[in-house]
Amino acid sequence: MKAMQIAATGMQAQQTRVNVIANNIANSDTTAYHARRAEFADLMYQQERRAGTVSSDTGTVLPTGVQVGLGVRGAAIAMDTSQGSLRQTTGDLDVAIEGRGYLEIALPDGTAAYTRDGALKRSPDGVIVTAEGYPVQPEITIPEDALQVSINGAGEVWAYFAGEAQATQLGRFGLATFINEKGLEARGGNLFVPTTASGDAEMGDAGTDGRGTLRQGYLEESSVDVVAEITSLIEAQRSYEMNSKVISAVDEMLAATNRVR
Amino acid sequence: MDNPSLALLSHQTGLQRRVDIVANNIANAGTTGFRREGLVFASRVERLDVPGRRFAMTEDRMSFTDPTAGGLTVTGNPLDMALDGDGLFAVQAGTGVAYTRDGRFMPDAEGRLVTATGHPVLDEGGAPIVLPPGAEALAVSADGTLSADGEAVAVIGRYRVDAGARRGADGLITTAGAAGPAPDTRVLGGHIENANVNPVRELTDLIEAQRAYERGQSMIEGEDERLRRAAERLAREP
């Protein structure tokens, strides 16, 4: 009987769903984390009796035949790219991205990665880096004697120095957009790398061509809705139980078959 | 085998298939746009060439897709679309045009609108839909018009397939016959259609099939016992 294997695919699907939910809940306080959602699609169908065959006794054509689906499979784990709410912080290097876009950072191996986590810091030599120490591109160095750093919505970084009335522009952050940001590959550490599904990064100034703006002194909170996650956790659990009921029912049917002499 | 055993055997085989279908419905209770399948049984009685003898069996004649609409989940993402009506979305599959009610769409790297399984979505004229680069405010109206930043981009195709359609690989619906437009089917942006599986009903069906199967097995045992006794009695008679 196929039903056992079919129910097994159902249980596996729900396990995947629980894993995704667990990861969402675990990251409900991670800066700029976007909730993921496991999505499913039905597996292929086996045509037990082809549609359109002529039934022998009366010569009528079967309109649909008998098709048995073979279960369910994970189609995608989609990222919810909606904006998380902004939380005010006191850090002058905390920047939240309001709208679309990612900051570009340079990994030690020279490749680029992208993040929305704007909890930026200064490295020992004054370079603006992420919390994990990767320099934000284009690299901007804050001189040691800068009194105050200000980052405006367009991504321009300005510094004030003692005895100078005018601020000096140190550089300008760009934002990267992707034609399909759901296709980005998550690397952990709030980092993403482009894939063939996401398309290449298109760098540009903040606030232009649909890119978001930067907001200094704020961080983007994770977009995880904990109540919704718990609800789907319960749903997944019940769904798992239902699939296991199918397995025990089939088991009993097979036991009945085995009893026949 | 004798006629009662044969009839019972066909009954048991049909029930197994019913359980397979119930299992698939339950496994897909969380699959967007999934529609539950059912099975139609029919009795089949045929007169044989031997006078007074008949051949009888039950037959699972056809499976059908339950056309009841599933509930809607609000996602807020304008590219998630549900259909209100009996129409289907058309997608470009490897072998040709296929149909689905699963409206979780997204742009791919070339900007084409594709399904969660990567098949390009087709417009009313049967052409793939390409989103303008950098489009920010995407919206879809009830008549299927997809607009970006207030300008119409394409009209999402809605099609109606004939009764001979079947579900193939990837759960997509294909038809050897004709598919016509279904302009009266409304498109709901920001929604996805849930599976129309009712868990209580499926579990009831499952238990019912299981008990009927057990009843069938005990009838087969009874029939076996009857034949055994008949044989013993006949052997004892002088």
Image (cartoon, coloured by chain):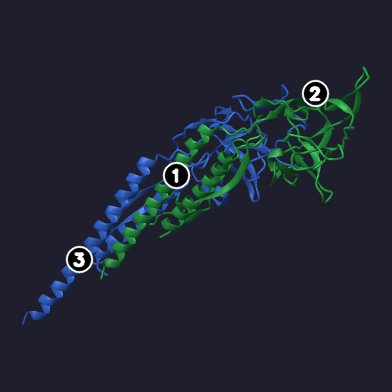
Chain colours: A green, B blue
Foreground: A117 or A257? A117
Where residue A105 sits, quadrant-wise, is top right
The numbered mark 1 sits on a residue in which chain?
Answer: A
Query: In the picture shown, does residue B6 fall above or below B27?
Result: below
Give SS at disc 3: helix
For label 3, the residue is B223
Which is more toward the observer, B115 or A191?
A191
The label shown at residue A124 is none
Q: Amino acid at mark 3?
A: Glu
Residue A244 x/y as whole percent: 40, 52
Distance between mark 2 and mark 3 Cα atoms: 84 Å
Q: Which of the two discs, 2 and 1, sits closer to the camera?
A: 2
User: For the residue labelled by badge 1, is the local secondary structure a helix, a strand or a loop?
Assistant: helix
Question: Split into 4 quadrants, where in the image is the N terminus of chain A?
Answer: bottom left
Q: Is residue B206 visible?
A: yes
Residue B163: give x, y in percent of width and height: 49, 42
In the picture as drawn, the residue positioned furthest to the top comes out as A165
- How packed mark 1 is, by other alpha carbons closer than 10 Å (few <14, some 14-19, many 20 or more), is some
Task: For the C terminus of chain A, give its image quadrant.
Answer: bottom left
The residue labelled by disc 1 is A237
**CB-based contact (under 8 Å), mark 2 and mark 1:** no
Residues B184 and A187: in front is A187
* x and y, in percent, of residue B235 in the image: 11, 80
Q: Earlier in the sequence, mark 2 or mark 1?
A: 2
The residue tagged with tag 2: helix, strand or loop?
Answer: loop
Pointer 3 and pointer 1 on the same chain: no
Taking depth in this image into account, of B113 and A170 the one nearest to the observer is: A170
Assess disc 3: are there few (<14), some (14-19) or many (≥20) residues with their C-alpha within 10 Å of its C-alpha: some
The reply to whether label 2 and label 3 mark residues of one chain is: no
Can you identify the residue that label 2 sits on? A153
Q: Residue at x 87, y 40 (%)?
A: A125
For the point 18% across and 71% down, the residue is: B227
